[in-house]
Amino acid sequence: MATTSLTTETGGFEVRRLWTDERSRAIIFQLLVVLGLALFIAFIVSNTIANLQRAGLASGFGFLTEPAFFDINQRLIQYTSESTFGRALIVGLLNTILVSSLGIVAATLLGFSAGVMRLSQNWILSRLVTAYVEMTRNVPVLLQIIFWWSILTELPKVRDSLSLGGAFILNNRGVRMPSPVLEPGFGWVFGAFIVGAIATFLVAKWAKRRQDETGQTFPMLWVGLVLIIGLPVVVHFILGQPLAWDMPERMRFNYRGGFNITPELIALWFALSTYTGAFISENVRAGIMAVSKGQSEAAFALGLRPNQTMRMIIIPQAMRVIIPPLTSQFLNLTKNSSLAIAIGYQDLVSIGGTILNQSGQALEVVAIWMGVYLSLSLLMSGYMNWYNKRIALVER
């Protein structure tokens, strides 16, 4: 009996000590939260499956192999109305990636330019950029998308198309331009481009090391242009121009040949670029202003010109402040591309909505939407975080 009593008292003491210890108590609370969350998710899943069975709906992703029976006007890969739902979603995903990539490039260039120009000593230029930033940031992006789409759809009809040298045709159906036709021998031109890109990378590393050691600059921009553009062009002409162009040709009711960029894509790209570019410009301006004025004064004392000071002294230091909010703007632009459904641009959300209406697989389609945008955001965020660490100051 004494032994049993001692064991009970020891067990009770261990339980009290486990509860009074802050670390142990925190672990217990976390386990309880995880257990509660798991039970909640299990309840939701069980209830959903029961409701689907009661409604006679089959769950799963088998519907992705069924034929779609609808057309997609803007596509980067081969697709017909007899293609599967799965292929239609891939086409929508590529359209989303296309407009997001184009928007990120344009918004970055516009944002950096506007951020620098807003700090210009030119009063008119500075005020014009300020007006652009304030007007664009304070109007909902959806209204801007509809605004630009309305303008583009009011362009002349096909019979009154605007032509630029017979190569670029502009009307209310979009912009039709020449499409490249690859002929035998073009592989050598592409190989020359790859060689030029590699050579540019190696020369850039050498130029940076040389500048760090001697302080002498190297005209890397012009050398890079010669290697990346000039070398493939020379090879192209040496091989007899193995790259032809399919030119737009006027038919009775429309144009044939070349490729067409729809007004929906142009409007969405332009609206997302200008809207996000306005926010990026403020990030750039804040980053530049975060750099001490002493840096500029020291650069001027060494004889550097203002453009050299901005490019080689200010911007590299400001990037450490610019990158984190810049990542958020890239993510916002990618997610805002889902507003394409408002003007009929067939991106992932728009095509997914059509599939949802035809198949009735609402949960599966929404899960695909969430998974795709989550994956794109995590990939983009991971790359930007890696780049941010790469340019961070290292304590020695």
Image: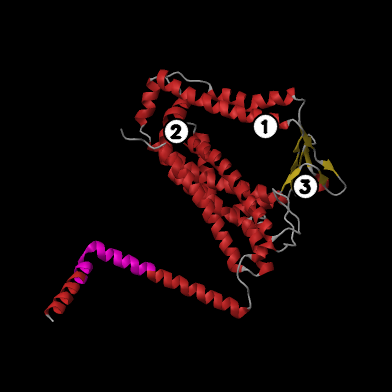
- Tell me the quarter of the picture where residue 349 sits: bottom right
Residue 139 in view of the camera:
no
Residue marked by disc 2: 315
Which region is colored magenta? 15-34
Disc 2 marks a residue whose amino acid type is: Ile
Residue extending farthest to the right is 252
Q: How many marks?
A: 3
196 or 96, which lies in front?
A: 196
Q: Residues within 10 Å of mark 1 (few under 14, many from 20)?
A: some
- Tell me the quarter of the picture where residue 210 sits: top left
User: Closer to the observer: label 1 or label 3?
Assistant: 1
Question: Do callouts 2 and 3 mark residues in contact (Cβ within 8 Å)?
Answer: no
In the image, is residue 136 above or below residue 341? above
Which percent across, then down, holds residue 148? 65, 50
Which percent across, then down, holds residue 164? 76, 36
Disc 1 marks a residue whose amino acid type is: Phe
User: Closer to the observer: label 2 or label 1?
Assistant: 1
Which percent across, then down, holds residue 376? 54, 51
Cα separation between marks 2 and 3: 44 Å
User: Closer to the observer: label 2 or label 3?
Assistant: 2
Q: Residues within 10 Å of mark 2 (few under 14, many from 20)?
A: some
Cα separation between marks 2 and 1: 33 Å
Determine whether the residue tagged by mark 3 lies in a helix, strand or loop: loop
Q: Residue at x 53, y 41 (%)?
A: 108
The label number, if any, that marks residue 156 in the structure image: 3
The label number, if any, that marks residue 190 in the structure image: 1
Q: Residues within 10 Å of mark 3 (few under 14, many from 20)?
A: some
Residue 146 forms part of the magenta stretch: no
- Chain-order first, disc 2 or disc 3: 3
Disc 3 marks a residue whose amino acid type is: Pro
Q: Residue at x 63, y 47 (%)?
A: 98
- Tell me the quarter of the picture where residue 6 sits: bottom left
